[in-house]
Image (tube, grey):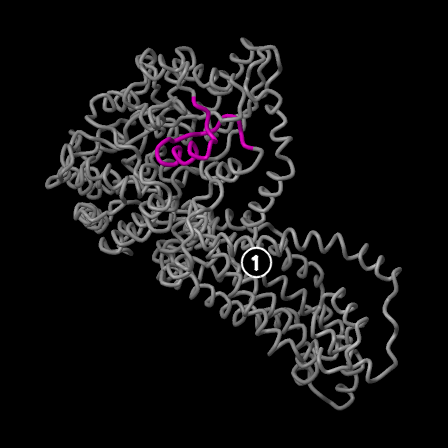
Amino acid sequence: MNTTRTTHAIALCAAAALAVGLAGCGDNSDSGDPGGSGDGGQVTITWWHNVTSDPGKTVFQNAADRFMDANPNVKIEIVPIQNEDLQDKLQTALNGSDAPDMFQQWGGGEMAEQVDQGLVMDISADSQKEVEFIGGSMAPWQYDGKTYGLPYTAGVAGVYYSKDLFDQAGITETPQTWEQFNDVVAKLKAAGIVPVGLGGKDAWPAGHWMYIMTLRMCGQEVIAQDTENKAFDDPCYLQAAQLLEDFGKTEPFEEGWVSVSAQQGAGSSSGMLANHKLAMEFSGVWETGQVQSLTPDGQPLADLHWFPFPSVAGGKGDPKAAVGGGDGFSCHAKAPKECADFLRYLVGDETQAEYAETGAGIPVNPSAVDKLTTESLKEAAAGSNEASFLQLWLDKAFGDSVGETINQESVGVLSGKTTPEQYVQGLIDAAKKG
Amino acid sequence: MASTSPSVAPRKADALAGSGPRRSRAEARSRRGAPRRGGIGWRGRVEVALLSGPALVVFVTFVIFPVILAAYFGFFRWRGYGVPTDFIGFDNYRWILGDPYFRAALAHNAFVVVMSIIIQGPVALGLALLLNRKMRGRSLIRVLLFVPYVLSEVIVGTGWRLILQPAGAFSAILEALGLDKLAHWDWLGSETIAPWTMMMILTWKYIGFAVILFLAGMQGIPEELYEAGAVDGASYWRMQFSITLPLLAPTVRIWGFLTIIGSLQLFDLIYIMWGPVAKFTGVSTMATYMVYEGRESNAYGYGNATAVILFIVTFTCALLYQRFVLRRDTDGALTGGR
């Protein structure tokens, strides 16, 4: 039936065998020019990204086409891979000898690990200009004072909502506090509208709720400490989980949300938002583009708007702080040096303007921000500017084992299957595993 | 080895054949019975080496070596990059065996093993008996029953997910039939319903395999026995109980073996249909636990330790089954080492 038991081991074994046997050959496409000194030579850059749907996919294709026209010696092979698959494949590929030259990079602890293993190219030298204009969002892609990647989009998570459905429920103002937020949920329910969408099957959407609640209750200082020592002994983690447990008991999510996926098809939570089947979703800056790809006509959802996550009473965190991050890319340490040029080209004025105009997401280049057309993106961009602090997604910040536990156990807490005490114990246990 | 008169040559031959004491006992037996042939000669050895060499290399590289490697990695705290260095002894194993989620996964595996045999066995037997009779459209039904087994598990999982998802096709059908209450059941997300949803899909998918296996077994039952039964005036059911079932038993036992191993390694369907929330819906298995706590968490040492436990559990079950259930089938079938 299946051979999963050994697949992983086989992959490792094969990787080990390849590493020994083929070390000299490496990746044919780039091994001829490891230092990247000869400008005249033909180079191929394989590029793995997770934007598998338009508008973003076309923006990337156009950018690669323009770059290849301007640099005839460069060939860019684009490989779009669905997000969850990409995360699996990348890890294996980076360990093996056929790693992509340029790949999705979310920064933080995971990137640090890759850097320590010598897998990522240091692009600090020629990137001062980009680092400067990207500003505060740049931090996750830097490590020990050096730059190892560039985000092409960044921003804070917030609540995306359908204005029409809010109007229908008689809601005129967006909520400022957690109490008001709960009132909005109650009003929507009373009007027969599903208040909140949550793609529980993918776990990380539930995790997002825990990240922001943890930030509200703990504040960024406690989180920063626990990123280092992973103690999780502050009672604020328990408080955050308790608040979400109570929130889950009010049944704010769509029916059967535990097994609903986040982004795949019209039955997913983003798909339901795109089709006016539910009123709001707490999500990152990709949401506008994601919703657009799931509307019946592929056009932006006209009444989609954005508001920042409300403040929560009794928390130590700054109510203006936000969780978020961005999507970016790194170049493999063995990639041709043109890879770094292309990385910078992606955050250049031209590509960023197109990225903003098509509504794919929030650009990192300030010159492109006023090119944004859709309301939700403009509001999210403004909100990102106003945020007092950008806390990187906690699953990325804490690293994988703890991060995965937060994501999964958030489903448990919100569905009442994990108690807040079990959740905190789960964090402590996960920290031991690696 | 010690039981026979020591001579150097046969020992060498044993060592070359590489199968240890078991073989030597067999040879001892054959030596007692008939005069022993003098080795297989160099031609024979070259032949053996040529024929078994490639298979042996592949087997050792892709089965034995990975198992050893997994056991090695299982002793480390290792995030998957570079060479593992953080040796932690049996800690991974302690954590896994103490984790309620792993115990739950083990229990779910046991549930699948037992339910697969209880549900699929009788149903498949009935279908096989039915399809063993001459009737119109028999081959068509056989093919239709076998179709789900041929489909890839990923496609099956995706398809059933789309059908059973909240507000999916299945709910719509139930609603159209006026079964509003049933339409709002959470077929995938409820801890009490999801395991049965899973069993339903597994049965649908694997029943064809069991039926084909049983039918093949029935073809091997000599016609004369039924003729003799008919002459003695036995009824149809009497013949099924006294002739078909006893003679089909070896096939059923092999089917049971394959089902147990398959159930213990169940992964694809769960991964596709439930993903990380399998542990909240009562359908996680040891294999999904391994993938989510190991690979998805980048805790590769932990994942490898889980793989070793999964291997041991499956291997033990297989050995016990062979020892206590399959022995009567293999007993006369094995030739004494020749």
Q: Chain of mark 1?
A: B
State the residue lying farthest toward the bottom.
B232
Q: Position of residue A382 (x, y in %)?
A: 24, 20
Q: Image point 60% across, 29% down: which residue?
A: A27
Check if residue A114 falls in the magenta segment: yes
Report the span colored magenta: A99-122
Relative depth, front residue between A361 and A321: A321
From this view, report whether residue B245 is shown above or below residue A393. Answer: below
Residue A185, quarter of picture = top left
From the viewer's perspective, is A136 left or right of B163? left
Q: Secondary structure at mark 1?
A: helix
Whole-percent x and y of residue A390?
25, 29
Query: What number of labels is visible?
Result: 1
Nearer-the-camera pick, A204 or A393: A393
Residue A209 shows in the view:
no
Q: Nearer the viewer, residue A26 or A398?
A: A26
Q: Quadrant of residue A354?
A: top left
Above or below residue A345? Residue B20 is below
* Relative image position of residue A18 (x, y in whole percent): 62, 39
Q: Residue furthest top?
A: A70
Which amino acid, mark 1? Lys
Q: Which residue is mark 1?
A: B205
Q: Residue at x 35, y 19 (%)?
A: A363
Q: Is residue B288 left or right of residue B25?
A: left
